[in-house]
Image (cartoon, rainbow, N blue to C red):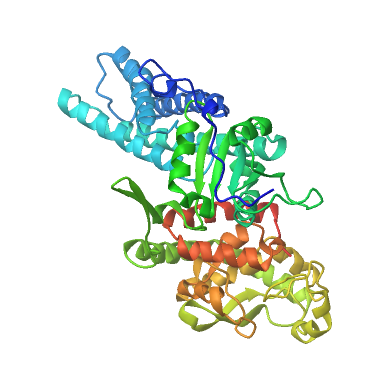
Amino acid sequence: MGELDSFEILPEHALTPLGPNGVPRSGWQRTKRASRWHRPYAAILLMLDIGAALMASLVAKTFLTDKAEFGFEQNPGLLNLSAFLLLPTVWLLSLWGHGSYDRRYLGNGTDEFKRVVRASWTVMAIVAFTAFAAGIQVSRTAVGVALLGGLLFVLILRYLARRGLQFVRTRFNLATHRMLLIGTLQEALEVHQAIARDPASGLVPVGIHLTEGYAPRPSTVTPVPVHAGRDILSLVRELNADTIAVCGSASAEPVELRRLAWQLEGTGIDLAVAPQLTDIAGPRVHIRPIEGIPLLYVEEPKLSGLGWLFKNVIDRVLALIALLVVLPFFPIVALAIKLSDPGPIFFRQPRIGREGKMFKVWKLRTMYVDAEERQATLDEHNESDGLLFKMKNDPRIFKVGKWLRATSIDELPQILNVLAGDMSLVGPRPLPADDGDFLGDVRRRLLVRPGITGLWQVSGRSDLSWDDAVRLDLYYVDNWSLVLDLHTLWRTIGVVVFRKGAY
């Protein structure tokens, strides 16, 4: 099979039927998507949102009737109408208007929750304006409880719904998008590898269509079948795919890409473009059309400014609260360490911090006092492919130490490093000063303060390869935000409870 210059364009007979004015039917008749999982899911979200709004109104009415005047003392029927019909209706309309049921934002990312928050602010503004314009004297406390409670209930129920969706995807392979990748073999395999790291996203590659080169021999092992020189639409139907992803350099063929988009109109098949720019989060990427050309702008990482100041304040406040909470339990843990092995309670080791500054990290001692001397005899059993020594059944760890590591209690003294400003609650893990070569991409980790937890820890911890750990750390540096920090702290709770990858 000869070498291909670009991906095959659909033949003329693959075009959708035209209307009387030569306009594709998809232009005047709504297209049914090939993937329809989002419809029942959106219906579930709709019912949950109604329930959340009703629960919030019920809470406000039940617990604040005796404490606050609602302004409807003479007409309780109007109170019930406003609380249990008008307010939920306004809430649902606001959620719909902000795209909270749009399939593009369901199941992945934070856009869905951002839109819920924006919709809630809109509801608050509508209620405030209506009360002012109509001269209704309502309790600000009651309204505040109803609105903030509604926001809280909606977020919680939607989060639980997403967890349920992710469970269905990973366990039963349902509610997914079957994706055909178009591009060179290397580019398509890179996209496949990135997608495979997150099965909860619901993206399932089912085939690769090559734009250059030859189709591999049947004996060549690839994660999905590889095709070349095929009619794309017939291949999509054969694979029962509902999404086409144009990868890497294939997206640089503007004419073919535009024609492909035209010819997919009315088929219900989604077209996605996976550019060669990877590991850059949405907030840093902006598309600005200039004379019909969509220019992709990539902003610099925001590692300073007001958001960074808030991060520092939150770090200190939460660290101080955590210190006060764990202090009463410290004598018990200290006694357990002493009884396990005579020696110091704490273990301090030089680490590299932000901008290459050296500091000593605090940890509870989990190994015997001669652990560092014994490491030389265990190097051949190292299970890590990176700079750190990792061994699941490390004989240098005493029994209580294994429990401290599994529960991550041994990391709690690093709260002192956070209060001292050497570390943050969230960030790349600090590497030992004597082992880190910090060359090339790894050195970029030093742009931020190391953290007690981070993307590395909530994504697998010691079970991850060194390359994956570095990739996650660099992703954090490039895409830092307060939302990412809070999300990582939330995920840390689950990781600690279920002891994922801790040894």
Q: State whether residue 203 is above or below residue 77.
A: below
| Residue nearest the viewer, comparing 183 with 439 | 183
Q: Position of residue 374 (x, y in %)?
A: 80, 84
Q: State whether residue 441 is above or below residue 169.
A: below
- Whether residue 72 sits left or right of residue 436 in the image: it is left
Q: State whether residue 422 is above or below residue 17.
A: below
Q: Is residue 453 visible?
A: no
Picture mark count: 0
Q: Quadrant of residue 38?
A: top right
Q: Position of residue 349 (x, y in %)?
A: 62, 82
Q: Is residue 157 visible?
A: yes
| Residue nearest the viewer, comparing 16 with 296 | 16
Q: State whether residue 159 is above or below residue 22.
A: below
Residue shown at 48%/61% (left/top)? Answer: 321
The C terminus lies in quadrant: bottom right
Q: Position of residue 264 (x, y in %)?
A: 50, 32
Q: Position of residue 429 (x, y in %)?
A: 58, 70
- Whether residue 225 sits left or right of residue 190 in the image: it is right
Residue shown at 39%/33% (left/top)? Answer: 99
